Image (tube, helix red, strand yellow):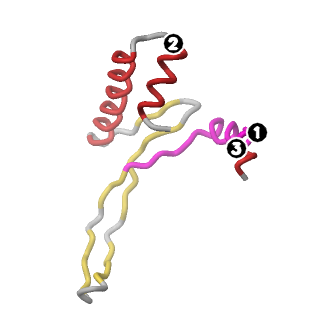
Amino acid sequence: MTKAEVVNEIVEKTGIERAMVAETVESFFKVVKSALTDGDNVYFRGFGSFALKKRAKKVARNISKNTQITIPEHFIPKFKPAKTFVEKIKKSEKVKKLL
């Protein structure tokens, strides 16, 4: 599902103008990105959390040049779904049909 499809679904379910919904969805993503950039985690009860995960420093190889590259420690964004969300997906009949 794309962002446009999410916006369309919200418009259909709520009746709010498409431009307003699109702006709200964009603002949501900006707030989450801003919070993670500032080092804060974002929690949504019953849905999940967006958090920063620290990656340790490591040595990688450039096979084509046969050289070693040191990748410094850094943070990456990570999403962890809530237990209730995971359970709902596991119990979904539509998802079970995909197996």
Q: CA distance from mark 2 to mark 3?
A: 26 Å
Kind of residue sitting beneath label 1: Glu
Residue 82 drawn in magenta: yes
Q: CA distance from mark 2 to mark 1?
A: 26 Å
Instruction: Locate residue 31: give its quadrant.
Output: top left
Q: Nearer the viewer, residue 1 or 32?
A: 1
Residue where numbered disc 2 is placed: 14
Residue at left offset 28%, top offset 36%:
34
Please indicate whether residue 2 sits to the left or right of residue 61 in the image: right
Q: Which mark is residue 93?
A: 1
Residue at left offset 35%, top offset 33%:
29
Q: Which mark is residue 95?
A: 3
Say if mark 2 contacts mark 1, CB within 8 Å.
Answer: no
Please indicate whether residue 44 sits to the left or right of residue 71 in the image: right
Q: Which residues are magenta?
A: 77-94
Residue 89 at what x, y percent from top left?
A: 67, 40
Element on which disc 2 rests? helix
Say if mark 1 contacts mark 3, CB within 8 Å.
Answer: yes
The disc, 2 or 3, on the residue closer to the chain's N-terminal end is: 2
Residue 13 at what x, y percent from top left?
A: 55, 16
Label 1: few (<14), some (14–19) or many (≥20) C-alpha neighbours in 10 Å? few
Residue 92 at what x, y percent from top left?
A: 73, 38
